[in-house]
Protein backbone atom coordinates (compact mmCIF):
# COMPACT_ATOMS: atom_id res chain seq x y z
CA UNK A 1 0.00 0.00 0.00
CA UNK A 2 1.44 3.33 -1.02
CA UNK A 3 1.60 6.32 1.23
CA UNK A 4 -0.96 8.09 -0.90
CA UNK A 5 -3.25 5.12 -0.67
CA UNK A 6 -3.02 4.98 3.06
CA UNK A 7 -3.80 8.67 3.49
CA UNK A 8 -6.90 8.43 1.38
CA UNK A 9 -8.06 5.32 3.18
CA UNK A 10 -7.48 6.92 6.53
CA UNK A 11 -9.59 9.87 5.58
CA UNK A 12 -12.15 7.74 3.84
CA UNK A 13 -12.89 5.81 6.97
CA UNK A 14 -12.30 8.52 9.51
CA UNK A 15 -14.85 9.96 11.85
CA UNK A 16 -17.15 12.72 10.66
CA UNK A 17 -16.45 14.82 13.67
CA UNK A 18 -12.98 15.54 12.38
CA UNK A 19 -14.36 17.45 9.46
CA UNK A 20 -16.53 20.13 10.94
CA UNK A 21 -19.59 19.52 8.79
CA UNK A 22 -20.62 16.54 10.82
CA UNK A 23 -24.05 15.13 10.21
CA UNK A 24 -25.53 13.72 13.35
CA UNK A 25 -24.91 10.12 12.41
CA UNK A 26 -22.14 7.85 11.24
CA UNK A 27 -21.23 6.92 7.72
CA UNK A 28 -21.54 3.37 6.44
CA UNK A 29 -25.16 3.00 7.47
CA UNK A 30 -28.22 2.69 5.32
CA UNK A 31 -30.74 5.47 5.70
CA UNK A 32 -34.39 4.76 5.04
CA UNK A 33 -36.37 7.18 2.96
CA UNK A 34 -39.87 6.95 4.29
CA UNK A 35 -42.60 7.01 1.70
CA UNK A 36 -45.70 8.38 3.36
CA UNK A 37 -49.00 6.82 2.51
CA UNK A 38 -51.73 9.12 1.40
CA UNK A 39 -55.20 7.82 0.85
CA UNK A 40 -54.89 8.11 -2.96
CA UNK A 41 -58.67 8.29 -3.44
CA UNK A 42 -61.58 8.52 -1.03
CA UNK A 43 -64.53 6.13 -1.28
CA UNK A 44 -66.72 9.04 -2.41
CA UNK A 45 -64.36 10.17 -5.16
CA UNK A 46 -63.89 6.57 -6.33
CA UNK A 47 -67.66 6.15 -6.66
CA UNK A 48 -67.97 9.45 -8.55
CA UNK A 49 -65.29 8.31 -10.97
CA UNK A 50 -67.00 4.96 -11.49
CA UNK A 51 -70.29 6.66 -12.28
CA UNK A 52 -68.63 8.93 -14.84
CA UNK A 53 -66.69 6.07 -16.45
CA UNK A 54 -69.80 3.91 -16.75
CA UNK A 55 -71.63 6.75 -18.49
CA UNK A 56 -68.68 7.33 -20.81
CA UNK A 57 -68.46 3.62 -21.67
CA UNK A 58 -72.17 3.55 -22.45
CA UNK A 59 -71.94 6.46 -24.86
CA UNK A 60 -68.73 5.12 -26.45
CA UNK A 61 -70.50 1.85 -27.11
CA UNK A 62 -73.42 3.68 -28.71
CA UNK A 63 -71.06 5.66 -30.93
CA UNK A 64 -69.20 2.50 -31.91
CA UNK A 65 -65.87 3.46 -30.28
CA UNK A 66 -65.98 0.40 -28.02
CA UNK A 67 -66.81 -3.07 -29.28
CA UNK A 68 -67.69 -6.15 -27.24
CA UNK A 69 -65.04 -7.42 -24.87
CA UNK A 70 -62.88 -10.30 -26.04
CA UNK A 71 -61.69 -13.16 -23.88
CA UNK A 72 -59.69 -11.93 -20.90
CA UNK A 73 -56.64 -14.10 -21.42
CA UNK A 74 -55.60 -12.06 -24.46
CA UNK A 75 -54.54 -9.03 -22.42
CA UNK A 76 -51.41 -9.01 -20.33
CA UNK A 77 -49.98 -5.88 -18.82
CA UNK A 78 -46.61 -4.27 -19.37
CA UNK A 79 -45.04 -2.09 -16.66
CA UNK A 80 -46.83 1.30 -16.71
CA UNK A 81 -43.73 3.47 -16.20
CA UNK A 82 -40.68 4.17 -18.31
CA UNK A 83 -37.88 6.72 -18.36
CA UNK A 84 -38.53 9.68 -20.64
CA UNK A 85 -36.39 9.93 -23.74
CA UNK A 86 -32.85 11.09 -23.06
CA UNK A 87 -32.60 9.74 -19.51
CA UNK A 88 -30.53 6.70 -18.64
CA UNK A 89 -30.99 6.17 -14.89
CA UNK A 90 -30.27 2.63 -13.75
CA UNK A 91 -33.51 2.59 -11.75
CA UNK A 92 -36.13 5.20 -10.94
CA UNK A 93 -38.95 3.73 -8.88
CA UNK A 94 -39.99 1.52 -6.01
CA UNK A 95 -43.28 0.13 -4.75
CA UNK A 96 -44.70 1.65 -1.58
CA UNK A 97 -48.05 -0.13 -1.46
CA UNK A 98 -49.87 -3.02 -3.07
CA UNK A 99 -53.61 -3.78 -2.95
CA UNK A 100 -54.91 -4.47 0.57
CA UNK A 101 -56.67 -7.87 0.48
CA UNK A 102 -57.84 -7.68 4.08
CA UNK A 103 -61.20 -5.90 4.02
CA UNK A 104 -61.03 -5.07 7.74
CA UNK A 105 -59.64 -1.79 8.98
CA UNK A 106 -57.77 -0.06 10.40
CA UNK A 107 -54.35 -1.70 10.50
CA UNK A 108 -55.62 -4.97 9.05
CA UNK A 109 -53.25 -5.44 6.19
CA UNK A 110 -52.51 -8.21 3.74
CA UNK A 111 -50.92 -7.85 0.33
CA UNK A 112 -51.02 -10.47 -2.45
CA UNK A 113 -47.90 -12.14 -1.08
CA UNK A 114 -49.32 -12.39 2.48
CA UNK A 115 -47.14 -9.50 3.64
CA UNK A 116 -48.20 -6.09 4.87
CA UNK A 117 -46.85 -3.79 2.16
CA UNK A 118 -50.16 -1.95 1.86
CA UNK A 119 -52.28 0.36 3.98
CA UNK A 120 -55.80 1.18 5.09
CA UNK A 121 -57.43 3.77 7.31
CA UNK A 122 -59.90 4.08 10.15
CA UNK A 123 -62.39 5.70 7.76
CA UNK A 124 -62.86 2.39 5.97
CA UNK A 125 -60.36 2.83 3.21
CA UNK A 126 -58.42 -0.20 1.96
CA UNK A 127 -55.75 0.55 -0.62
CA UNK A 128 -57.02 -0.77 -3.93
CA UNK A 129 -54.15 -0.18 -6.32
CA UNK A 130 -50.39 -0.43 -6.68
CA UNK A 131 -48.43 2.68 -5.65
CA UNK A 132 -45.21 3.09 -7.60
CA UNK A 133 -43.08 6.00 -6.34
CA UNK A 134 -40.16 7.82 -7.95
CA UNK A 135 -36.79 7.35 -6.23
CA UNK A 136 -34.48 9.08 -5.60
CA UNK A 137 -35.31 12.81 -5.82
CA UNK A 138 -38.91 12.19 -6.84
CA UNK A 139 -39.92 15.87 -6.80
CA UNK A 140 -36.98 16.81 -9.00
CA UNK A 141 -37.80 13.90 -11.31
CA UNK A 142 -41.38 15.12 -11.49
CA UNK A 143 -40.27 18.67 -12.32
CA UNK A 144 -37.95 17.36 -15.04
CA UNK A 145 -40.70 15.13 -16.44
CA UNK A 146 -38.24 12.30 -16.12
CA UNK A 147 -40.72 9.45 -15.89
CA UNK A 148 -43.52 8.71 -18.36
CA UNK A 149 -46.68 6.86 -17.49
CA UNK A 150 -47.39 4.54 -20.40
CA UNK A 151 -50.36 2.35 -21.20
CA UNK A 152 -50.00 -1.16 -19.78
CA UNK A 153 -52.09 -2.57 -22.65
CA UNK A 154 -53.88 -1.59 -25.88
CA UNK A 155 -57.22 0.07 -25.29
CA UNK A 156 -59.55 3.05 -25.54
CA UNK A 157 -59.51 6.18 -23.38
CA UNK A 158 -62.74 6.14 -21.36
CA UNK A 159 -62.03 9.07 -19.07
CA UNK A 160 -59.40 11.68 -18.28
CA UNK A 161 -58.96 14.61 -15.94
CA UNK A 162 -56.13 17.15 -15.88
CA UNK A 163 -55.27 20.57 -14.45
CA UNK A 164 -55.20 19.72 -10.74
CA UNK A 165 -52.39 20.89 -8.50
CA UNK A 166 -49.43 18.58 -7.70
CA UNK A 167 -48.60 20.04 -4.29
CA UNK A 168 -51.67 19.19 -2.26
CA UNK A 169 -49.53 17.05 0.09
CA UNK A 170 -52.52 16.13 2.20
CA UNK A 171 -53.63 12.60 2.83
CA UNK A 172 -57.14 13.84 2.14
CA UNK A 173 -58.32 14.27 -1.41
CA UNK A 174 -59.55 17.80 -0.99
CA UNK A 175 -58.55 18.32 -4.62
CA UNK A 176 -59.08 15.82 -7.41
CA UNK A 177 -56.25 13.90 -8.96
CA UNK A 178 -55.23 14.04 -12.59
CA UNK A 179 -55.90 10.67 -14.14
CA UNK A 180 -56.56 8.70 -17.27
CA UNK A 181 -58.65 5.56 -17.55
CA UNK A 182 -58.15 2.95 -20.28
CA UNK A 183 -60.55 0.17 -21.25
CA UNK A 184 -58.67 -2.80 -22.73
CA UNK A 185 -59.80 -5.16 -25.48
CA UNK A 186 -60.92 -7.80 -22.95
CA UNK A 187 -63.13 -5.26 -21.17
CA UNK A 188 -60.75 -4.79 -18.23
CA UNK A 189 -60.06 -1.22 -17.16
CA UNK A 190 -56.86 0.39 -15.81
CA UNK A 191 -56.75 3.61 -13.78
CA UNK A 192 -53.63 5.78 -13.78
CA UNK A 193 -53.82 8.33 -10.96
CA UNK A 194 -51.86 11.29 -9.47
CA UNK A 195 -50.50 12.34 -12.88
CA UNK A 196 -48.57 15.59 -13.19
CA UNK A 197 -50.58 18.72 -13.90
CA UNK A 198 -51.08 19.39 -17.61
CA UNK A 199 -49.03 16.38 -18.68
CA UNK A 200 -51.80 14.17 -20.04
CA UNK A 201 -51.84 12.81 -23.57
CA UNK A 202 -53.92 14.76 -26.07
CA UNK A 203 -55.75 11.53 -26.98
CA UNK A 204 -59.45 12.25 -26.42
CA UNK A 205 -62.07 10.12 -24.70
CA UNK A 206 -62.74 7.41 -27.26
CA UNK A 207 -59.19 7.66 -28.61
CA UNK A 208 -57.24 4.48 -29.36
CA UNK A 209 -54.16 3.83 -27.21
CA UNK A 210 -51.43 1.31 -27.94
CA UNK A 211 -49.58 -0.66 -25.28
CA UNK A 212 -46.55 1.41 -24.22
CA UNK A 213 -48.05 4.67 -25.51
CA UNK A 214 -47.48 7.86 -23.50
CA UNK A 215 -50.36 8.73 -21.17
CA UNK A 216 -48.81 11.42 -18.95
CA UNK A 217 -46.06 12.12 -16.41
CA UNK A 218 -45.82 10.81 -12.88
CA UNK A 219 -47.03 13.54 -10.54
CA UNK A 220 -48.53 14.08 -7.11
CA UNK A 221 -52.03 15.44 -7.77
CA UNK A 222 -54.94 14.61 -5.47
CA UNK A 223 -54.45 12.83 -2.15
CA UNK A 224 -50.72 12.27 -2.46
CA UNK A 225 -47.67 13.19 -0.41
CA UNK A 226 -45.08 12.59 -3.12
CA UNK A 227 -44.76 11.79 -6.81
CA UNK A 228 -46.12 8.32 -7.53
CA UNK A 229 -48.45 6.45 -9.82
CA UNK A 230 -51.55 4.83 -8.37
CA UNK A 231 -52.34 1.96 -10.75
CA UNK A 232 -55.70 0.31 -10.27
CA UNK A 233 -57.28 -2.42 -12.42
CA UNK A 234 -60.86 -3.72 -12.77
CA UNK A 235 -61.92 -6.98 -14.35
CA UNK A 236 -64.62 -5.46 -16.54
CA UNK A 237 -66.55 -2.34 -17.43
CA UNK A 238 -68.95 -2.73 -14.52
CA UNK A 239 -66.02 -1.59 -12.35
CA UNK A 240 -67.14 -3.71 -9.42
CA UNK A 241 -64.51 -6.45 -9.51
CA UNK A 242 -61.12 -5.11 -8.55
CA UNK A 243 -58.06 -6.99 -9.82
CA UNK A 244 -54.67 -7.13 -8.17
CA UNK A 245 -52.38 -7.62 -11.16
CA UNK A 246 -49.87 -9.46 -8.92
CA UNK A 247 -50.63 -13.16 -8.47
CA UNK A 248 -49.80 -14.65 -5.09
CA UNK A 249 -51.04 -16.84 -2.25
CA UNK A 250 -53.00 -14.09 -0.51
CA UNK A 251 -54.51 -12.50 -3.59
CA UNK A 252 -58.18 -13.23 -2.96
CA UNK A 253 -59.37 -11.28 -6.01
CA UNK A 254 -57.85 -13.28 -8.86
CA UNK A 255 -55.49 -16.21 -9.35
CA UNK A 256 -53.72 -15.34 -12.58
CA UNK A 257 -51.11 -12.61 -12.83
CA UNK A 258 -52.10 -9.78 -15.18
CA UNK A 259 -48.47 -8.94 -15.86
CA UNK A 260 -46.70 -10.22 -18.94
CA UNK A 261 -43.69 -10.50 -16.67
CA UNK A 262 -44.52 -10.12 -12.96
CA UNK A 263 -41.78 -8.41 -10.97
CA UNK A 264 -40.59 -10.17 -7.82
CA UNK A 265 -42.22 -9.17 -4.52
CA UNK A 266 -38.90 -7.64 -3.45
CA UNK A 267 -37.45 -6.05 -6.57
CA UNK A 268 -34.10 -5.19 -4.95
CA UNK A 269 -31.75 -3.06 -7.00
CA UNK A 270 -29.65 0.06 -7.48
CA UNK A 271 -31.56 3.15 -8.59
CA UNK A 272 -28.69 5.63 -8.69
CA UNK A 273 -25.08 6.25 -7.65
CA UNK A 274 -23.59 9.73 -7.50
CA UNK A 275 -21.03 12.06 -5.91
CA UNK A 276 -21.93 15.12 -3.84
CA UNK A 277 -20.18 18.06 -2.18
CA UNK A 278 -22.60 17.74 0.75
CA UNK A 279 -25.31 15.33 1.74
CA UNK A 280 -28.63 15.76 -0.04
CA UNK A 281 -31.56 17.24 1.79
CA UNK A 282 -35.10 15.95 1.48
CA UNK A 283 -37.50 18.76 2.49
CA UNK A 284 -41.12 18.09 3.22
CA UNK A 285 -43.81 17.95 0.53
CA UNK A 286 -43.94 19.69 -1.96
CA UNK A 287 -40.46 21.22 -1.85
CA UNK A 288 -37.97 19.79 -4.35
CA UNK A 289 -34.96 17.98 -2.92
CA UNK A 290 -31.62 19.75 -2.58
CA UNK A 291 -29.30 17.26 -4.25
CA UNK A 292 -25.90 18.85 -3.64
CA UNK A 293 -24.51 16.75 -6.49
CA UNK A 294 -20.99 17.53 -7.68
CA UNK A 295 -18.67 15.81 -10.14
CA UNK A 296 -15.58 18.03 -9.86
CA UNK A 297 -13.30 18.03 -6.84
CA UNK A 298 -9.93 19.49 -5.96
CA UNK A 299 -7.56 18.58 -3.16
CA UNK A 300 -9.02 19.29 0.24
CA UNK A 301 -12.59 19.00 -1.05
CA UNK A 302 -14.97 16.63 0.65
CA UNK A 303 -16.64 13.99 -1.47
CA UNK A 304 -19.75 12.08 -0.53
CA UNK A 305 -20.31 8.83 -2.43
CA UNK A 306 -24.00 7.95 -2.48
CA UNK A 307 -25.92 4.84 -3.47
CA UNK A 308 -29.73 4.88 -3.73
CA UNK A 309 -31.44 1.51 -3.49
CA UNK A 310 -34.90 0.01 -3.70
CA UNK A 311 -36.19 -2.96 -1.72
CA UNK A 312 -33.05 -3.45 0.34
CA UNK A 313 -33.27 -6.66 2.39
CA UNK A 314 -31.51 -7.88 5.52
CA UNK A 315 -28.15 -9.43 4.68
CA UNK A 316 -27.78 -7.96 1.20
CA UNK A 317 -24.28 -6.69 0.43
CA UNK A 318 -23.23 -3.76 -1.74
CA UNK A 319 -19.72 -3.80 -3.22
CA UNK A 320 -17.99 -0.47 -3.80
CA UNK A 321 -14.83 0.33 -5.76
CA UNK A 322 -12.89 3.52 -6.49
CA UNK A 323 -11.00 3.38 -9.78
CA UNK A 324 -8.14 5.75 -10.52
CA UNK A 325 -7.77 7.63 -13.82
CA UNK A 326 -5.24 5.00 -14.98
CA UNK A 327 -7.89 2.29 -14.59
CA UNK A 328 -6.37 0.61 -11.54
CA UNK A 329 -8.28 0.05 -8.34
CA UNK A 330 -7.62 2.63 -5.64
CA UNK A 331 -9.66 0.96 -2.95
CA UNK A 332 -12.76 -1.13 -2.49
CA UNK A 333 -15.10 -1.91 0.36
CA UNK A 334 -18.40 -3.61 0.99
CA UNK A 335 -21.41 -2.91 3.14
CA UNK A 336 -24.10 -5.27 4.36
CA UNK A 337 -27.55 -4.20 5.52
CA UNK A 338 -28.34 -5.71 8.91
CA UNK A 339 -30.46 -3.10 10.65
CA UNK A 340 -33.88 -4.47 9.67
CA UNK A 341 -35.84 -6.68 7.31
CA UNK A 342 -36.66 -4.41 4.42
CA UNK A 343 -36.35 -0.83 3.22
CA UNK A 344 -38.48 0.08 0.20
CA UNK A 345 -36.23 3.09 -0.42
CA UNK A 346 -32.84 3.73 1.14
CA UNK A 347 -29.56 5.46 0.60
CA UNK A 348 -26.02 4.91 1.78
CA UNK A 349 -23.06 7.21 1.79
CA UNK A 350 -19.30 7.13 2.30
CA UNK A 351 -17.23 10.20 2.87
CA UNK A 352 -13.70 11.21 1.87
CA UNK A 353 -11.46 14.21 1.52
CA UNK A 354 -9.42 14.48 -1.66
CA UNK A 355 -5.75 14.34 -0.61
CA UNK A 356 -3.19 16.76 -2.00
CA UNK A 357 -1.49 14.09 -4.08
CA UNK A 358 -4.59 12.41 -5.48
CA UNK A 359 -4.26 11.31 -9.11
CA UNK A 360 -5.65 13.98 -11.41
CA UNK A 361 -8.32 13.20 -13.96
CA UNK A 362 -11.51 11.19 -14.24
CA UNK A 363 -12.10 8.73 -11.41
CA UNK A 364 -14.80 6.13 -11.35
CA UNK A 365 -17.02 5.09 -8.47
CA UNK A 366 -18.28 1.56 -9.16
CA UNK A 367 -21.04 -0.23 -7.27
CA UNK A 368 -22.05 -3.88 -7.68
CA UNK A 369 -25.31 -5.11 -6.24
CA UNK A 370 -27.14 -8.34 -7.06
CA UNK A 371 -25.50 -8.73 -10.46
CA UNK A 372 -25.97 -5.12 -11.55
CA UNK A 373 -22.95 -2.85 -11.98
CA UNK A 374 -23.22 0.93 -11.86
CA UNK A 375 -20.48 3.44 -12.67
CA UNK A 376 -20.26 7.12 -11.85
CA UNK A 377 -17.40 9.33 -13.10
CA UNK A 378 -16.07 12.27 -11.11
CA UNK A 379 -13.13 14.50 -11.84
CA UNK A 380 -10.18 15.32 -9.58
CA UNK A 381 -8.59 18.62 -10.62
CA UNK A 382 -4.97 19.66 -10.73
CA UNK A 383 -3.63 21.07 -7.47
CA UNK A 384 -3.00 24.79 -7.65
CA UNK A 385 0.31 26.01 -6.29
CA UNK A 386 -0.99 29.25 -4.92
CA UNK A 387 -4.00 28.56 -2.84
CA UNK A 388 -3.43 31.31 -0.29
CA UNK A 389 -3.11 35.05 -0.75
CA UNK A 390 0.45 36.11 -1.50
CA UNK A 391 0.00 39.67 -0.42
CA UNK A 392 0.44 40.11 3.33
CA UNK A 393 -2.68 42.28 3.20
CA UNK A 394 -5.20 39.78 1.96
CA UNK A 395 -7.90 40.23 -0.61
CA UNK A 396 -11.08 38.59 0.67
CA UNK A 397 -13.24 36.65 -1.76
CA UNK A 398 -16.60 35.61 -0.36
CA UNK A 399 -19.10 34.01 0.14
CA UNK A 400 -18.07 30.47 -0.63
CA UNK A 401 -19.98 28.45 -1.71
CA UNK A 402 -21.97 31.03 -3.61
CA UNK A 403 -24.74 31.14 -6.14
CA UNK A 404 -25.04 34.23 -8.30
CA UNK A 405 -22.30 36.62 -7.26
CA UNK A 406 -19.00 36.88 -5.43
CA UNK A 407 -17.66 39.77 -3.34
CA UNK A 408 -14.05 40.81 -3.66
CA UNK A 409 -12.87 43.03 -0.81
CA UNK A 410 -9.52 44.80 -1.02
CA UNK A 411 -7.67 46.14 2.05
CA UNK A 412 -7.65 49.52 0.32
CA UNK A 413 -8.86 50.79 -3.05
CA UNK A 414 -8.50 48.45 -6.02
CA UNK A 415 -5.16 49.28 -7.64
CA UNK A 416 -5.08 50.31 -11.31
CA UNK A 417 -4.64 47.45 -13.79
CA UNK A 418 -6.12 44.78 -11.56
CA UNK A 419 -7.61 41.82 -13.36
CA UNK A 420 -10.10 39.22 -12.28
CA UNK A 421 -9.50 35.78 -13.80
CA UNK A 422 -11.88 32.87 -13.38
CA UNK A 423 -10.92 29.35 -14.48
CA UNK A 424 -12.96 26.16 -14.54
CA UNK A 425 -11.52 22.97 -13.08
CA UNK A 426 -10.64 21.92 -16.63
CA UNK A 427 -8.29 24.94 -16.79
CA UNK A 428 -10.50 26.82 -19.27
CA UNK A 429 -10.63 30.57 -18.71
CA UNK A 430 -14.21 31.65 -18.05
CA UNK A 431 -13.67 35.32 -17.24
CA UNK A 432 -10.93 37.92 -17.73
CA UNK A 433 -11.94 41.43 -16.76
CA UNK A 434 -10.30 44.60 -15.48
CA UNK A 435 -11.72 45.56 -12.10
CA UNK A 436 -13.04 49.03 -11.34
CA UNK A 437 -10.38 51.02 -9.55
CA UNK A 438 -11.22 53.46 -6.76
CA UNK A 439 -13.48 51.02 -4.97
CA UNK A 440 -12.64 48.61 -2.20
CA UNK A 441 -15.59 46.20 -2.36
CA UNK A 442 -16.67 44.74 -5.70
CA UNK A 443 -19.67 42.60 -6.40
CA UNK A 444 -19.06 40.31 -9.40
CA UNK A 445 -22.01 38.67 -11.14
CA UNK A 446 -21.54 34.93 -11.73
CA UNK A 447 -24.94 34.07 -13.17
CA UNK A 448 -23.44 33.20 -16.56
CA UNK A 449 -21.38 30.38 -15.01
CA UNK A 450 -22.88 26.93 -14.56
CA UNK A 451 -22.68 25.17 -11.20
CA UNK A 452 -19.28 23.74 -10.33
CA UNK A 453 -15.85 24.51 -8.94
CA UNK A 454 -13.84 27.51 -10.17
CA UNK A 455 -10.50 29.12 -9.41
CA UNK A 456 -10.62 32.88 -8.95
CA UNK A 457 -7.40 34.86 -9.27
CA UNK A 458 -6.78 38.55 -8.67
CA UNK A 459 -3.85 39.78 -10.77
CA UNK A 460 -2.24 43.21 -10.32
CA UNK A 461 0.14 44.33 -13.03
CA UNK A 462 0.78 40.73 -13.99
CA UNK A 463 1.38 39.60 -10.41
CA UNK A 464 -1.05 37.19 -8.74
CA UNK A 465 -2.35 38.82 -5.56
CA UNK A 466 -4.90 36.26 -4.47
CA UNK A 467 -6.31 32.95 -5.60
CA UNK A 468 -9.30 31.16 -4.22
CA UNK A 469 -11.22 28.07 -5.15
CA UNK A 470 -14.96 28.66 -5.02
CA UNK A 471 -17.97 26.44 -5.42
CA UNK A 472 -20.88 27.78 -7.39
CA UNK A 473 -24.10 26.03 -6.45
ZN1 LIG B 1 -52.48 4.42 -4.21
Image (tube, rainbow, N blue to C red):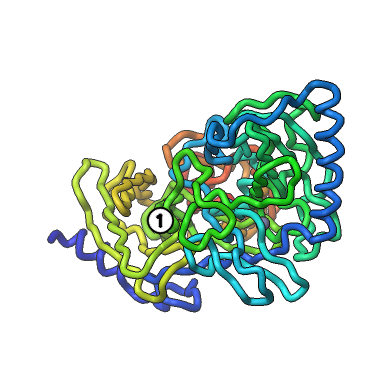
Nearer to us in this view, 422 or 210? 210
Write the residue at 32% across / 73% down.
14
Taking the view exactly as shown, the residue that stands out farthest to the left is 1
**Horizontal placement of 446 versus 372: left or right?**
right
Where is residue 9, by image quadrant?
A: bottom left
**Horizontal placement of 131 versus 169: left or right?**
left
- Judged from the image, the quadrant occupied by ligand 1 is bottom right
Of the 4 image quadrants, the one containing the N terminus is bottom left
Q: Which residue is mark 1?
A: 268
Asked whether residue 272 is in view, the answer is no
Asked whether residue 468 is in view, the answer is yes
Question: Where residue 196 sits in the image (x, y, percent)?
Answer: 73, 44
- Secondary element under disc 1, as helix, strand or loop, is loop
**Horizontal placement of 468 versus 41: left or right?**
left
Instruction: Say above or below: 114 vs 425.
Output: below
Nearer to us in this view, 386 or 220? 220
Nearer to us in this view, 472 or 217? 217
Write the residue at 32% across / 54% down.
369
Instruction: Say above or below: 345 vs 295.
Output: below
Question: Where residue 322 sits in the image (x, y, percent)?
Answer: 28, 52
Amino acid sequence: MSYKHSIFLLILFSNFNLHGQAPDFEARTFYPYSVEHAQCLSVEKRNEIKTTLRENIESLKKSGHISAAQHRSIVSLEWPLRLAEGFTDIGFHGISAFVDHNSNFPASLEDYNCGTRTFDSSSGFNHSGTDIFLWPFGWSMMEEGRVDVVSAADGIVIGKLDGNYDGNCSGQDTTSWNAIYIRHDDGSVAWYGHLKTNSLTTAPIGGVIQQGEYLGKVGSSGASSGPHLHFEVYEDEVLMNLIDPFAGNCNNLNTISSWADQKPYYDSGINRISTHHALPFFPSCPMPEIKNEENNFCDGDQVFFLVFLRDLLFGQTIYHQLIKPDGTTFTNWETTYQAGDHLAASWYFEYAVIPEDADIGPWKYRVDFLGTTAFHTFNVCAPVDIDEPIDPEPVHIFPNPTSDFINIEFPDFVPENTQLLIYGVDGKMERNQILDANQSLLNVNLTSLSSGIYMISIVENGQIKATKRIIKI
